[in-house]
Amino acid sequence: MHEEISRKNVDSNNLNSEESQIDSQVNSRAFENLLQQYYSAWFRFHPEAAVHVGVSGYEELLTPFSDEDIGALISLHQKIIFSLDEFPVSELSANQKLDFSILYNAASIELHELIECDWRTRMPQKYLPLEAIHQLVSRPVKNLHKALKHRLQSVPEHLRSAKSYLMQQPEKVPENWVTDAINGASSGVVYFRELLNNPKIIHEFKKPLRLQVVINDAVHALEEYEKFLRNTLQPLAKGGFACGESHFNTLLNNGHCLDVEMQQLHGFGEALFNQTQTELEALCKRLPGSDDVEEQLANIRHQHPLEKDDQLMNAYRNRMKAAYDFVLEKGLVSLPQTQSLKVVETPVFMRHEIPFAAYDEPCIQDPDQKGYYYVTPVRSEGHLLEHNWTSIDLTCVHEAFPGHHLQFVTANKNLNNSLPRLLNPSATFYEGWALYCEDMMQEQGFLNQPEHYFIMLRDRLWRALRVMLDVELHTQNLSIDKAAQRMCDALGFSIDQAKADLSWYSRSPTVPMSYATGWALIKALRENESKKADFNLKNFHDRLLSVGSCALPLVIKFEFGESAWIEAKNKVFGEPC
Ligand SMILES: [Zn+2]
């Protein structure tokens, strides 16, 4: 009897487990279908994002923004959130659960932003179709001819409609956002005029001059838009840029999955700022020359390559190669087999946003995984000081190896990659990693001069100040002018340099805080992990990069476990009361 009951139990257990396996396969497929349906609709409203992640079918479109379009997008978000709320998430695989969280958070944030703070009436820069054109000539794109022609043809109507939305409540548009858009539009005019000289167009178009008419129309439309911004909108624009406490918290908690209070975050920035300042002053006393931070900085800055004969560009190329060789030789992290990094001049329309240099990652479909490192042509002697030898070394580590380029290419070749991960990179992860790399390459001996340490500490001071300013600008009514003064006092920035940096903070709440926060969390995680008997540095780095570019807390929880996250978080932000 006893045996009979047990057998029945065994049989029914087997049956249950088979049933649940079938259930989980069904749910897994249902989730993939849901993703596919959602994104094929979502890309229609975000065609540039589609090109960026290599999904074809949207290359001919500019971002639509009519009331009908925005209504449809809102309804799409409401539907996906409803479907996700109903979905049996516990049945999904670990990778799918991660994608589920990312999608849920991203959809909730976008829905909230569309309903609560309609970008169409406040953000003149968002209408500029410059990246929409540039991405076609810098990324692998199907039907380039048709795509380029259609997008350019749509520019005049696109910018005409933009004006009517911006005039709905012109007093609510922040003035510095209008200034940014004016600068963007005028450099866009230069970019469009030079478009026919673009190597890809010369190479792929048999009769590029046929584009001339649509380019002329697009140039004219941009010129008109610039005039409108300058003469009509700017005198009326008096709006505030702060996103407010509630949205800032949402971005922290859902966008970056960082479950900390704003006060804790601000306290972390302040403590790091004070500690870094003390370290920097102590280092100055040990360095030969002056014990004044600004004088030391001036000495370092005056050692730089010249711009002539490609010396500056070659300096970056050579030091990037040296950083790559060092990482390979020391076996610090796995290097992707297929990748390349091209050092080129910053495209004209980006120069007002990239005063010195920046990195642009390859899209997942690019078979060569070619990233770009943009160096903005030097405009003055003072500008060249930013490209001093010490900063070039740090930049090559931060932007290239083992920083951004290595990290993004590794994420692109990830077999578990998915649209939610590719479309929702978080600066807590990719900027945190890049700053951590500066530290690590110093510890490993690549950045081996005291000047490297000096510049790194000074940059850390800047990133710590960013944490405080990010919180204060968006939740405590700090003005751009007062924030700029604090940057000038603490970092010796010029007012223009400070304001350019701050204008970006005003448009991107919670991104500025991500640099130092991500760096500190990765450092804390490593300190804890390194206590384990089987700790291996290369393995630690590979695990960290194995998940994708999504929010750092998610990466840590997924790969190292919930308790590793709690420990790292408590180490950085303090134990909860
Ligand atoms: Zn960076």
Image (spheres, rainbow, N blue to C red):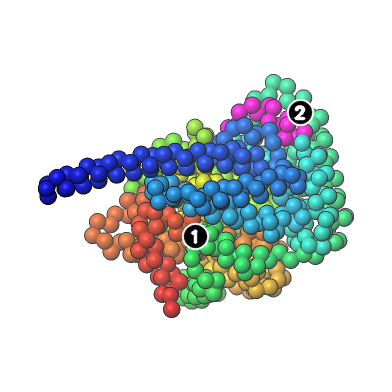
Residue identified by numbered label 1: 257
Q: Nearer the viewer, mark 1 or mark 2?
A: 1
Q: Write down the quadrant of residue 51 in the picture.
A: top right
Instruction: Please give left or right for residue 76 compared with residue 89 in the image.
Output: right
Residue placed furthest toward the front: 1
Visible residue check, residue 288: no
Instruction: Please say whether residue 143 is one of the residues in the magenta stretch.
Output: yes
Badge 2 density bin: few <14, some 14–19, many ≥20, Cα 10 Å: some
Q: State left or right for residue 415 relative to residue 132.
A: left
In the rendering, at what x and y percent does residue 27 appear?
43, 42
Q: Nearer the viewer, residue 73 or 532?
A: 73
What residue do we see at 44% from left, 56% from top?
Answer: 554
Q: Residue at x 59, y 47 (%)?
A: 79
The residue carrying mark 2 is 211
Q: Residue furthest bottom?
A: 577
Q: Main secondary structure of the magenta part?
A: helix
Give the extent of the magenta segment.
Answer: 140-153
Seen as rendered, the residue at the extreme top is 206
**Pointers 1 and 2 in contact (C-beta within 8 Å):** no
| Residue at the image point whose x is 68% and y is 40% from the top | 132
